Image (tube, coloured by chain):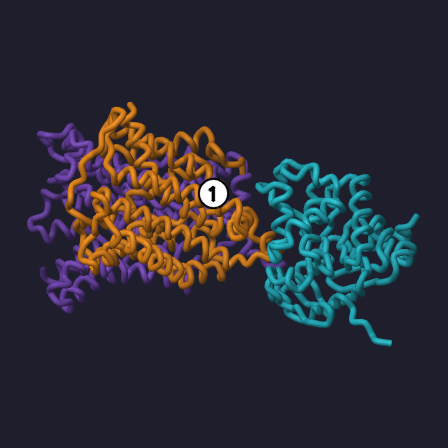
Chain colours: A cyan, B purple, C orange
Amino acid sequence: MTATVPHLVVEDLVAGYVPDVPILRGASLKVNAGELVTVLGPNGAGKSTLIKAVAGMVPVTGGDVRVSGKSIRGIATHALVGAGVAYVPQTNNVFTRLSVEENLELGCICDVPRTRERIEETYRLFPDLERLRRLGAGRLSGGQRQMVAVARALMARPGLIMLDEPSAGLSPKMTGVLFQKLLEIRAGGVTILLVEQNAKAALAICDRGYVLAEGRDAFTGTGAELLSSTEVGELYLGSKARLAS
Amino acid sequence: MDITSYFVFFSVVAVIYSISVLGLNLQWGFTGIMNIGVVGFFGVGAYAAALLTGPDYPDSLGGLGLPPVVGYFGAMLASGIVALLVGLVTIRLRHDFLAVATFGVAVCIQMLAMNLKPLTRGFDGLHSLPRPFASMAATPFLSNLYFLAMVLCIGGALLWALERMTRSPWGRVLRATREDEEASAALGKYAVSYRLQAFVLGSMLMGLSGALYGSFMGFVSPQDLLPIFTFQIFVMLIVGGSGNNFGAILGAVTIWALWTLTETVLGAFLPPELQRQASAIRVVFVGLILVLMLLYRPQGLLPERRNISSFAASRPDKA
Amino acid sequence: MMQVLVDGIVAASFITLGVVGLSMVFNILNFPSFAHGELITSGGYIALAIVALFGTVGSIAGLSFGWPLIIALMCAAVLNSLLALVLDRSIYRQMRVRNASRISLIMASFGVSLMLRNVVVMFAGQDPHFFTFTIQPALKFWGIRITANELIVVGVTIVLVLGLHLFLSRTTLGKSMRAVAENASLARVNGIDVDYVIRWTWIIGTALATVAGVMLGFTIQLHPFMGFELLLPMFAALIVGGMTSIYGALLGALLIGLAEGLTVEYLASEYRQAATFVLIILVLLFRPHGIVGEKA
């Protein structure tokens, strides 16, 4: 039996915007191929910083990041797509001055000949976007923009897609629609790393989760385990409660 | 010219330049306002003073023959008003707009000086501008010396006043608005008025500097209003240390020394056929210094001193 | 009145060629480059130097220029772009890497502008130069007067602007540029190499500036301040049209050119800059984001 290499490994990552003030202080996690793993934690715990450090946008001073066994620590951000990793930032994640279709085209800029066919495939997965294709992305609602951002990330046919709090600013209904899409994407074989503030919704759809606190991974387990854990509940709700209640 | 006379002449010009640099320091060093039209405000001041104090020119409306001191105050008023008008339009907007607007002011002032002949006598300029104490000085050297004494007093007083102001709560507000461009755009009207005050005051200093220059040289013309002056002031501030009033003065003296020294050296060592290019070579050389300073020591020779409230500094407990 | 329109369009053409580069640098490198005027000047003078190698500017079909000028223009565009790349590499990029503020970059560009201008003076002196001394007769038709040179200027500008539009809307690099202009960080996330885009921004912007310089040179004259004199009109075009949009800048250039034409006709040629400045102030007062620009 061959040991499969995890798709993404973050090992004892130390990172921060300013060298002597690390936000991540030795965070570790593993995402296996085809999994949907969520990263939770209170504000300031370093969730966004973790994704940005993997994306090469925050300086890393210790530890390692590996995609399919190959280290991508300190990678130039524009090389991410080539390494098979797509990243959906939390804010400003679409080009508002470009149309929906142009946004999608840009997602495929590393493989221009296949753009047309991939756009058609994307429209099959996101039929609403086909209706909106010529509209300037700046005219879309928050929920529609998130869909464009996620669809754009998929245009590069990544093996791994990382999302930074995609439900931020969305209504509960919209969040549900978005998360349903993520499950469809996972069903298509894409590995997903989901950083989220909305712990309940994220834990409901994930295979496994990590909870970050003070720059380190404090808890880990399956979605169900974390939902019913009192420690996790305390972290979020401040008392010995459970998220699942 | 013998050494002492040269030294006096050099010092007067250096102090006059320092006053403009102090003005830019207030605008850019403390408040983060980018004024690319320094020479425009210098020019407004120079011409205002010239028109007020010059003799009655036959071909110009100006030349009221008033005492030089009136000219100096008139210069500050005129440049202050121009700055106020420009500032009211632009101070709330992004830095780039102010930069372009001040640049436009400088271009227009030079153009007006060249073309509003009934007022400015165009290319011929305004001559025979008076100095204070002119009657008391027996020789040109003494006249220069009195002038030096005067500008040193003015410069010293300004330095003292600026130091007091920039260390005060007023100065701290300026520095706060300097830090974040977006935040300062969102600031309420009181903070905006602080920035406007700094911009106008700084421009008034530049106008005063222009008036003093005209008074000393006895002559102003559109040739004094070229962008090279703005460039010199920038280099002086960057080299000396922006955000530091003493740095401003140090920069003025250093760069003026370098400027005049280069002229002498180039004059001595360049072959005759390249003499024409001497001034151009000098600009390229000093420009290189500006760029190198911006790259490798942007804080200048005398960096800005971190200024904590005098109350906090004296408290025994430290956070 | 028609004549004013025609003169305005000719004036607008020079501004247009310059403002495209200025707009691109502003949107992609995030600072208004005060040295852009000098790139126009240097472009013209480099072409002059190359033409001097040929000994003559040549003549095609009675025009005041021929193949030597065309070849000189293309070589000058390459060399001038190289100059811009060197300046970016050695100065602006170093400052970008050190997280310099926009103000410092503006100041550096002002320093670069003075240096460039004076390097030109070092080599060519302060006096004006000419590509050719043949006087061109003005063509007269439909009640307007225009020289063949000026017609060519307008024609070339229109062709280049159309080309630019196609480039920005149809090519990968063009779309990448638009992406970087809006959000460089998101562009990187999409796999766009921003440094590569920056290099091409300088190349394209400077090439267009070179065309402006050469055309100014053969329609009027070459002198060290020629690019500097276009700087205020170019900034005005940016502000009037809207700083975030290249198409706004093009519209702005047209308007500023027309304003110049009107000023020359009804006031005096010397007051062109003042009229431009007044327009800037008016726009800043009433619509700071420009005609086409977005509210910040």
Which residue lies at the image location 16% right of the left edge and 36% below the top edge? B122
Secondary structure, mark 1, is helix
**Image location of residue B111, percent across then percent down:** 24, 37
Q: Residue at x 42, y 31 (%)?
A: C283
Q: Is residue B315 visible?
A: yes
Q: Considering the image in quadrants, where does the C terminus of chain B appear?
A: bottom right
Label 1 packing within 10 angstroms: few (<14), some (14-19), many (20+): some
Task: Tell me the residue at 25%/30% (across/down).
Answer: C264
Tell which residue pokes out farthest to the left in this image.
B138
Residue furthest to the bottom in view is A1
Q: Quadrant of residue C139?
A: top left
Mark 1: which amino acid? Answer: His
Task: Report which residue position mark 1 lands on.
Answer: C165
Q: Please give the name of the residue rendered at 73% of the width and 42% of the height, measured from the top-left corner.
A: A169
Q: Nearer the viewer, residue C20 or C51?
A: C51
> Along the horizontal axis of the image, is B110 left or right of B142?
right
Q: Position of residue C80 (x, y in %)?
A: 34, 57
Residue A132 picture location, percent across and down: 68, 37
Q: On the rendered structure, is B28 left or right of A128?
A: left
Q: Position of residue B272 (x, y in %)?
A: 11, 64
Which chain contains the residue that carries disc 1?
C
Horizontal side, residue C46 vs residue B221: left or right: right
Quadrant where the N terminus of chain B is found in the figure: bottom left
